[in-house]
Image (cartoon, rainbow, N blue to C red):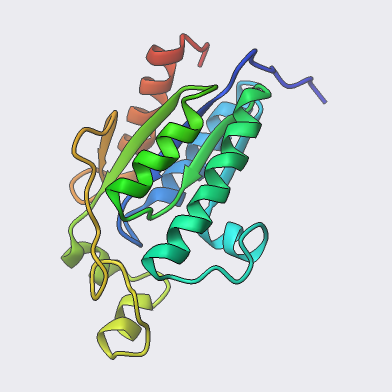
Amino acid sequence: MAKKKCLDKGFVLWLTGLPGSGKTTIASKAKEILEEKGYRVELIDGDWARKTISLGAGYTREERRIHLHRIAWVSRLLARNGVIVLASFVSPYREVRKMIRDIIIEEVPFIEVYVKASIDTVIKRDPKGLYAKALRGEIKHMTGIDDPYEPPENPDLVLDTENNPVEKNVEDLIEYIKSRFSLEL
């Protein structure tokens, strides 16, 4: 097996957007491409994190803040050790994303990627059935239903999953990484 390329310093691509917007799908495909080119990459997404490093994390504003604080530190530690981190989290509040950015940029680059899709589109997609449950009142603190999503005001990159196919969004993300970090991709 070929040895993985270890960057002197990695970076964190933080994909934020409504549940069902396509964050993890895009991040998974980007991870495959980066790994095929020999880079060390970690994908951290909300479902995995809530089953492992944030076991028992809830969905209130404060519980989300604490959960994402943990993820920011894990992301920073990985990236400072040469890993490219793809973090896929709803992270609905601007002030919490600012906290995440502040933690990470002390040591490594942080790139905020807004995975954009309207509430109508993600309700139609509803891959996990969460919106249907929230609309029936079975789930509380559902982002976009009874909890707000505050879109980024100045993201580094916007990926429009409502109007562009997955492949185009992955290509745009890879091109951004390639040009921003001068990687051979």
Residue 36 falls in image quadrant: top right
Location of residue 107 with respect to 45 vertically, above or below = above
The structure residue drawn at horizontal position 50% and vertical position 57%, both measured from the top left corner, is 66
Left-right relation of 11 to 157:
right
Residue 173 versus residue 59: which sits nearer the camera? 59
Q: Position of residue 103 (x, y in %)?
A: 49, 34
Question: Total marks drawn?
Answer: 0
The structure residue drawn at horizontal position 38% and vertical position 78%, both measured from the top left corner, is 129
Residue 77 falls in image quadrant: top right
Residue 48 versus residue 184: which sits nearer the camera? 48
Left-right relation of 89 to 163:
right
Residue 152 versus residue 36: which sits nearer the camera? 152
Residue 9 falls in image quadrant: top right
The N terminus - image quarter? top right
Q: Position of residue 151 (x, y in %)?
A: 22, 48
Location of residue 132 with respect to 44 vertically, above or below = below
Location of residue 135 with respect to 7 vertically, above or below = below
The structure residue drawn at horizontal position 47% and vertical position 65%, both measured from the top left corner, is 63
The structure residue drawn at horizontal position 73% and vertical position 22%, both measured from the top left corner, is 4
Q: Position of residue 89 (x, y in %)?
A: 43, 52
Location of residue 108 with respect to 95 vertically, above or below = above
Left-right relation of 22 to 109:
left
